[in-house]
Image (cartoon, coloured by chain):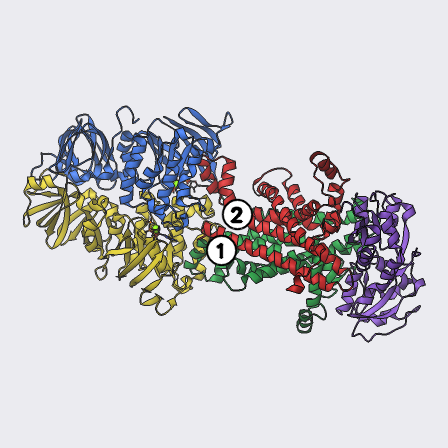
Chain colours: A purple, B green, C red, D yellow, E blue
Amino acid sequence: AEDKVVVFAAASLKDALDAVNKACEADVGEAATVSYAASSALAKQIEGGAPADVFISADLDWMKYLSDKKLTKPDTEVKLLGNQIVLVAPKDSAVDTRIEKGFDLAKLIGDGKLAMGDFKAVPAGKYGKAALESLGVWSSVEGKVAQAENVRAALKLVSTGEAALGMVYATDAHAEKGVKVIGTFPEDSHPPIIYPVAQTADSKDKDTPAFLKCLQSAKAAALFKDQGFTVLAPSN
Amino acid sequence: MNWLLDLTPDEWNAVRLSIKVATVAMLASLPPGILIALLLARGQFWGKTVVNGLVHLPLILPPVVTGYLLLLTFGRRGPAGAFLAEHFGIVFSFRWTGAALACGVMGFPLMVRAIRLSIEAVDRRMEAAAGTLGANPLWVFATITLPLILPGLIAGAILAFAKAMGEFGATITFVSNIPNETQTLPSAIYTFTQVPGGDEGALRLTLISIVISMAALVASEVLARRVGRRLDIE
Amino acid sequence: MNWLLDLTPDEWNAVRLSIKVATVAMLASLPPGILIALLLARGQFWGKTVVNGLVHLPLILPPVVTGYLLLLTFGRRGPAGAFLAEHFGIVFSFRWTGAALACGVMGFPLMVRAIRLSIEAVDRRMEAAAGTLGANPLWVFATITLPLILPGLIAGAILAFAKAMGEFGATITFVSNIPNETQTLPSAIYTFTQVPGGDEGALRLTLISIVISMAALVASEVLARRVGRRLDIE
Amino acid sequence: MSVLVDISHRQGGFAIGARFESAGRLTALFGASGSGKTTLIGMIAGLIRPDKGRIEVDGRVLVDTGAGIFVPKHKRRIGMVFQDARLFPHLSVAGNLRYGRWFTPPAERYADIDAVVDLLGIGPLMNRRPAKLSGGEKQRVAIGRALLASPRLLLMDEPLASLDEARKAEILPYVERLRDEIKIPIVYVSHSVAEVARLASDVVMLAQGNVVASGPTEAVMQRLDLLPAEERGEGGAVLDTKVLHHDENFGMTVLGSAAGELRVPQLAMKTGTPVRIRIRARDVMIATEKPRGLSALNILPGTITAMSPGEGPAVEVGIDCNGVTVLARITEQSRQALKLHLGGKVFAVIKTVSFDRANTGAGLPAETGG
Amino acid sequence: MSVLVDISHRQGGFAIGARFESAGRLTALFGASGSGKTTLIGMIAGLIRPDKGRIEVDGRVLVDTGAGIFVPKHKRRIGMVFQDARLFPHLSVAGNLRYGRWFTPPAERYADIDAVVDLLGIGPLMNRRPAKLSGGEKQRVAIGRALLASPRLLLMDEPLASLDEARKAEILPYVERLRDEIKIPIVYVSHSVAEVARLASDVVMLAQGNVVASGPTEAVMQRLDLLPAEERGEGGAVLDTKVLHHDENFGMTVLGSAAGELRVPQLAMKTGTPVRIRIRARDVMIATEKPRGLSALNILPGTITAMSPGEGPAVEVGIDCNGVTVLARITEQSRQALKLHLGGKVFAVIKTVSFDRANTGAGLPAETGG
Ligand SMILES: Nc1ncnc2c1ncn2[C@@H]1O[C@H](COP(=O)(O)OP(=O)(O)OP(=O)(O)O)[C@@H](O)[C@H]1O
Ligand SMILES: Nc1ncnc2c1ncn2[C@@H]1O[C@H](COP(=O)(O)OP(=O)(O)OP(=O)(O)O)[C@@H](O)[C@H]1O
Ligand SMILES: [Mg+2]
Ligand SMILES: [Mg+2]
């Protein structure tokens, strides 16, 4: 990995980023090495001296955690991708509703559970909680929430029928056959979902700028969109 | 001290729940643990390798995978889960019982190994002697084998308990993280580690977890020593 | 079969790496494992409880916490890490050696327990007899104690190996998930579970992991049986 | 009561093929180290499954490999005193002793714990763990443990080997009482001629896994050639006698036998009680004229019926004393000096003190003993 | 060579306080079951740390609690044959035997493996595991193992208890050879008077943890009162004699002693060789007139110097035969009938065949033995 660009990326980006990485191989000179893990772990590893050149976080908090400690190069930080929160149910579920202010989510959940990411720790969970609060239904469903370790685990809870409903990223719901999407939460019901990217302060690999540039290229944008992300960075 | 014990109600519940889950997991896995250990130590049957492999599976698999398999099997719609719920009213999904199941399963290979090792160390001539005194195999087991393997049982139990106190991946995957129901200490700690600046909270809960487990450990050592003294090895 | 073995180069690397990491973790923890087990089984010293507690810590703590502590201690900027790198050129951070360290630490309590249990079962009168024949304590250990605890050593080693094959939380937290360097099988499996449609890949790698561990398990059983036959219990 | 054993078995390089039948009260298994004694009683106890053969105790078939019968050990009610005591290390002495009682139907419990504890002198040890006992103490507890299970047949594997003479002498009478009062049949492994001669009604002699002789003790013990050279002097006549009267003055008991009266150190037995005595061949002298001024009190007249060279300078002389054969072991020199010949009239001279406790046991009532 | 033990120690309810010193070649520790024999030699071997006291072997201080000296067992070069064989279960018989050699400097290896294996008759067992041995076989291997470590002092804890007489008789001469040829000092635990009398130059008698007598064998063995009642007949005079000549015709050897000539079964020893014999008190008869027509060949004239009541009807009579005291055990009735009195002239009558192998051992050369 010595001469390669090393990217620390949130695990949920794997499919998209693998594709982009491959597409960028020619531009950068060689494929980057990507280490996928939870944003928290990656941030702490960078803090602990990890040989990462690029950090792609699943939320702004962990990026800020590093930039506050001057571990990123501020001028390289870019809001790369966006995402949406959707309400999902098991494929065979009869539930149907419109997501709007004050909709009766508690009734839809019934005796079951609402699966979502840990709303203190997992970005998707935080956004989900914010959305439900702004729609005024949080207090009625708080006791029925099953917090999962990450979005994928929440999705599993729904697809196996354990949980009646779930709140996950559109990108995850999109490819999961076991669930159906009931609706998308309004963009303004939660803080914008943003995947920021930055070069680390310790980054030395000379190809890093090229990699960052390629990440924001049009062909990358197309690949990201294939996976359901919204592309925030201006294609150049 | 104040700082350490100044917990939110949810955190207190996590402490209580963790102890409950770990204790139940340990106790409930003892009988099957002894049985399987006996089978593996003494049995000569086709498929022993398979049983042995199955027992070790939770050790080999990443906890998340184990949790997922539990979900598929003992979940609401899983075959075992549906059966148990229907016929015995035992429900695991999103219940503390599910957390105990996950912890028990994860600790099972550790417990079985410890017990098995002790069984294999038992002097079988003692059992033969008991047989000539009229004890049938069951009695021999209860009055000779069991007392002789007590140190191993204790070691196995404490391993299972400690493992349960630290188990997280399988539990959260299987029964998620519901405060007061399935949020054990490790889940709570995990939550803290996932937020910037959560380190202090994580540290506090970690310390509490350590204190509890150490207390259990010391108790087990004392117990084992007392048993050992009774056995008078030299 | 083809489906099972149709792996990408990165995945092949993960398989190779996992075997390497698990083997190194197992072998490297054997000597300290035996030492600590001896100390705990035989020693009478102040602070024994502390040592015992420390050994069990990786079991009690959520793996993420263990990984984080390793990062703080043995990371490039950690005290032990900096010291070792400077004086011995041993670098753990984000190397496969770090993965081995993490796996070794996580498996350590299991190994120590198994060995300790065996040591406690050794008939000390045999050691006394060896002493009267002129063997000093070291020789007694090498020629009497060690052969007698071999079954326990094997059990401990296989537990550590299996644990290493499944260890994930501490490893990914400590050395991240860098393909060809620190991406072990569990990390690769984890990555698969994090993306839509990754289940098949995860299943495939899981099966491979099971096959490897089972092979090790069977080998250990055969070995233990051979040793056991040599000991002729009854 | 009868024991029938007819088995063949291999273990490692050792082959055992033994057939014997004994209806005796106490059957001694006698043989050198490694001759297969422990293996044989292991089969009777159910610890070893013979490759082939049949074992019956009191008509009950315990093993019949042909018919696929193998009664498990815990259903045999056969007590065993192991050569190595094999006490349960996790139980106190009391716990060890009481262990077998749990499994004995109350109606069949004939052994009383207090009596057994008293007899074996293990009262002060009751709360000790086996690891804290001396070698002999362990063996005594092991005997007690087997007894207290009230077995129907008792197997004893060299139970007294690690005991001193004083303790042996104390325990032997109890073995006799087991044999005669409780009437529990016993198979007793021993390599001591003295013990065998004193205790056994029947002897089975083993050599390298084979039965070389078996039958009533009297008969087998007279065949000095079967005894190991070192033990020949210990062999000799075994006489069944009766207490005639006691001589309180001199602390002696006079026994009546077909051969004549015998004076022995006083026995605590009532007049008329049968007593079995062994007269060691090496303790018997021969006189051609009735000795005078000699301290030996027992002088039995008889006729020489047999003479055979023994080991070394010894000659074994059989003297028929009114139908009972007494064996004497003398030197060839004496034989020539005294001009002994078959049919010659002689006196067998035996000291009273040669009848020590090792030679004098409770007699076996007439109807048994072979 | 000397052993000095002066210790006091408690274990559980048992207190031991023993002091003795022995410069003998073979010191026998004699005492009943539970009297502390194993505990005592455990201390000499370094297995047990006495609470208080001092142990010296050959001037080397092994234990001195006052000075805080405690030489660890592996530095003592003291071999031990345990009461329970304690073979290493993971090693073959050969491995067990060879174990101690590793730790013996080549120059100090006096024991030859082939010779020891031959002697103990364990050749066919070499590749066996201990679990597959009979009780006696185990004990023989244990003896071999201790020997082959070529120790400077050998402790033997009832090494022959589980062996049959034939095997005992085979091994005893080797113990004698260890004592006399290899000149390895031995401390020998036993409860057999015969073994002690035959082997020991010195005897230490233990009772309940205390030394009740110690000294040269000849002296201690004459004190029949110290022997357990059952063993008194076994006690008696121990005579050091010399081979005068052999009587090939009759297969006998004539020994010369101060008391007169003694005829015993032929010994494979050269003329002039010292021989030690034990004359059991119960084997000695007393005659007031020289017996005629009697098969007993040894008739020693002497004067009664002591008479004391023994157990039961027995009287112990000491007869001074030209400066050597021979003990006889007769009945009170005989004493009265023969009108025995102190100072009376009598004959001690002893059969040749009473000198069996158990009574006749290699003599201890004159300069040693107490
Ligand atoms: N498990 C075994 N495998 C192979 N051979 C064995 C086994 N156990 C005993 N032997 C052999 O079988 C023979 C008979 O053994 P056994 O224990 O019956 O002898 P024993 O007559 O009781 O001798 P002792 O008086 O020494 O106790 C011996 O030669 C012994 O070496
Ligand atoms: N570890 C122990 N703790 C307490 N008491 C013990 C211990 N070991 C032995 N004893 C007691 O000490 C006494 C002496 O034991 P020891 O083994 O020395 O006897 P011994 O003379 O060798 O007897 P034996 O001839 O039966 O072997 C016995 O009364 C025994 O019960
Ligand atoms: Mg035997
Ligand atoms: Mg002893």
Task: Identify the subunit bearing mark 2.
Answer: C
Image quarter of the N terminus of chain B: top right
- Report whether C232 appears left or right of A100: left
- Residue type at numbered disc 1: Ile
Categorize mark 1 by other alpha carbons within 10 Å: few (<14), some (14-19), many (20+): many
Q: Pointers 1 and 2 in contact (CB under 8 A)?
A: no
What residue is shown with label 2?
Answer: C150
Tell me the quarter of the picture where residue B55 sits.
bottom right
Position in image of residue D235 (x %, y %) = 20, 48
Front residue (pair A229, C147): A229
Tell me the quarter of the picture where residue E257 sits.
top left
- Report whether D368 appears left or right of B46: left
- Relative height, residue D307 to residue E22 (above, below): below
Point out which mark residue B144 bears: 1
Task: Identify the subunit bearing mark 1.
Answer: B
- Residue type at numbered disc 2: Leu
Picture residue at 36% right of the left edge, 26% below the top = E1
Q: Is residue A209 visible to us here? A: yes
Front residue (pair E63, D298): E63
Q: Nearer the viewer, mark 1 or mark 2?
A: 2
Position in image of residue B7 (x %, y %) = 80, 51
Position in image of residue D369 (x %, y %) = 23, 59
Picture residue at 39% right of the left edge, 55% below the top = D146
